Image: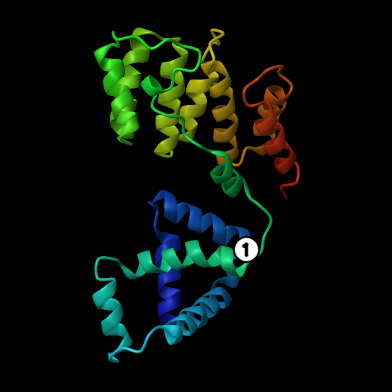
Amino acid sequence: MNNNNRNKLKEDFLSNSTHSEFEQESLEGWNEIGLENWDNIHQRLDNLIDNQAQALPKIERKPTISIWKKIYKPLSIAAIFLLALGIGIRMLYDKTETNVTLFNEYYQALDAPEDNFRGEEKTQDVESKARQASDAYDELEYKKSIMFYSELLAESPNNSKYTLFLGLSLMNVGEYDKAILLYNNHHPDNSSYDEDIQWYLALAHLRKGEIQTSKAILENIANTKNNYYASTANDLYSKLSQLK
């Protein structure tokens, strides 16, 4: 890719006001290493791709542009470019862990609520709307689960289970601010879900880069006797203390 094309892609990408979550993470990666390294990294990526191409089995040679158009027709040049960023930056730069990498390491969504009865007895009579919310969450249809859990919370404003899974649904679509507001407004009711809410609240702050707030919550979890997340929270707290 020549410098003119590379610079055009750079300008288009940076001037775009609506980035997907993947594009936003790519941009965060660029901000970490410094945008002044843009051309240097891309030259190295070009060389890496060329070297990999040389290692492929010999096939009938066709113009490189024709091959790329055939293989990546559904993708725009910018999408291919961002894919290279997402894969290449971590390969080319050995950097310390960031809030995003730590979030991805520790975030694990719970099972759908009606399949996760820690501390509860399963009954045959499950409310229809709760079942719909659970099924939508289980099928990764988070917009639907957000709708159903919002309706359920309107009827039962302090239900810990509904609060927890509404917040998780919001986090799974990138709405971390809304999840944080929801969890902060929740009043603990001594259910096992209260521990989950605090853990995911800490992770939501971590994902947003609010390290000190996340550490404060993690420290409280780690120091709470018999807390389900105490050991994991202590481990994550130690790693956050090393973040630069």
Left or right of residue 221: residue 109: left
- Residue at 55% x, 65% y: name it: 89
Type of the residue with mark 1? Ile
Residue 64, x across and y down, in percent = 32, 86
Residue 115, x across and y down, in percent = 38, 23
- Residue at 52% x, 27% y: name it: 180
Residue sitting nearer the eye, 18 or 56: 56
Say how many tags the image has.
Answer: 1
- Residue at 62% x, 23% y: name it: 228
10 Å crowding of disc 1: few (<14), some (14-19), many (20+): some
Q: Secondary structure at mark 1?
A: helix
Would residue 212 be visible to someone looking at this image?
yes
Would residue 2 be visible to someone looking at this image?
no
Q: Quadrant of residue 12?
A: bottom left
Q: Which residue is mark 1?
A: 33
Task: Establish if 217 lies above or below 49.
Answer: above
Q: What's the colour scheme?
A: rainbow
Task: Establish if 81 lies above or below 150.
Answer: below
- Residue at 34% x, 30% y: name it: 137
Residue 159, x across and y down, in percent = 44, 11
Q: Quadrant of residue 206?
A: top right
Q: Quadrant of residue 15?
A: bottom left
Left or right of residue 191: residue 16: left
Task: Establish if 23 lies above or below 118.
Answer: below
Residue 56, x across and y down, in percent = 40, 83
Task: Establish if 77 lies above or below 133.
Answer: below
Left or right of residue 162: residue 244: right
Q: In the rendered view of the protein, which quadrant contains the N terminus?
A: bottom left
